[in-house]
Amino acid sequence: MSRTLRAYQVVATLVGLNLIFVITAAVAQRTTDEFSWWNRNESLIFTIDQVHGLLFMVLLVLIAMLHTKHRWKPAFTISTMLLATIPLVTFWAERRTTHAVLARSGTAEAR
Amino acid sequence: MRHWLRPGLLGLHAFAVVAVGFCIVMGLWQLGAYDSRQGDAQDGARHEVVPLADVWKAGEAFTSDLKDQRVSVEGRFADDDLKVTRDDGSTWLVTPFVIGDHALLVVRGEGERAPASDATELDVVLEPSESGGRALGPERDGVRTTDAISVPALINDLPHRLYSGYGIALTDTGLPLVDPPEPDVSWTVGLRNLAYALQWWVFAAFALFMWWRMASENVAMRRAEDEAEPGFDAPVA
């Protein structure tokens, strides 16, 4: 397995977990009163939000690298990037990408 | 050029336009949110009026967080009116406002002569003592003249123990009021929205970059296919 794919898997999983937290926090901040944990730790959550933004940028770069390396079609690359923004779906998207890359390299080796 | 306008690529072009446009608009929206938070903070600073004693005791130094603070004061005007000529050619009328055993210099407004005022409650904006200021001139028509509201310079000439700053009146005491300076709001208020705006624009740039890369790869591939078609002498790569 290539290092790019491994890096992609790690970052995609982190982004997926982080995204669940970010969405949960955003909803909780708007639905709970100002003394709830979510609203008392606003600056912590803000920092995590920023980390999520940066990690997502890293993820996009890794997807772009996989795109070049494995000559993906634009539709596959773009859908991979978009699916990484939907909570929970991110994990499935990571599996989809991994299967696609491994299946391709598997057939290449078999030849 | 015809490779760039191939139907298969038009979808990619359209998607790129939508994606870049969306990111730019979202960034502008966050920038707008940043601006409005800055404005709200300024309005908040403007409207928050607290009793003077809550933020500043007589005899204490004027700290920077007192600047532009709106306070309410209770007391009475003394009758030592001062005329302060300003750099812009206007003249401010300043009267000490006696609060307990101290007095706060209060800019009552623009004018040459102070109408007597029996106001006992005022709202003022606190400002630090100005520097410089020449000694008070001789009394003329019950008013003495200087060119700066400098507490250290005035403290010897006035029969009061002065607060070490002055106030600009927000309450009308018979003179046209002076506009207080706009309160300073730190640029970090609403920083979250500014950060999001910048992130959106980074995404816009990235989308543009990806579009360029995918489209040019695709075009290069088609060209290579064209050249490899039978009937052409394809160069050996």
Image: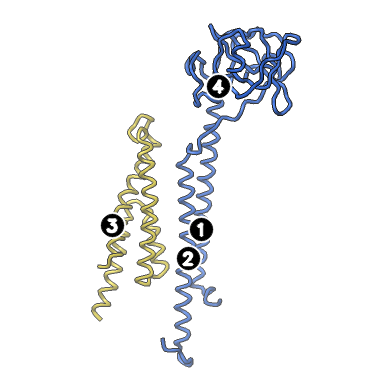
Chain colours: A yellow, B blue
Q: Which one is nearer the viewer's eye here, B45 or B210?
A: B45
The residue tagged with tag 2: helix, strand or loop? Answer: helix
Q: Residue at x 52, y 77 (%)?
A: B3
Q: Residues within 10 Å of mark 1 (few under 14, many from 20)?
A: many
**Residue corresponding to mark 3:** A10
- Give the total number of marks visible in the rendering: 4
Give, as a three-letter code, the residue at label 1.
Val
Q: Residue at x 65, y 25 (%)?
A: B179
Measure the C-alpha gap from mark 4 to mark 3.
54 Å
Give, as a three-letter code, the residue at label 4.
Arg
**Residue corresponding to mark 4:** B70
Q: Are marks 2 and 4 in contact (CB under 8 Å)?
A: no
Give, as a three-letter code, the residue at label 2.
Trp
Measure the C-alpha gap from mark 1 to mark 2.
10 Å
Measure the C-alpha gap from mark 1 to mark 4.
45 Å
Measure the C-alpha gap from mark 2 to mark 4.
54 Å
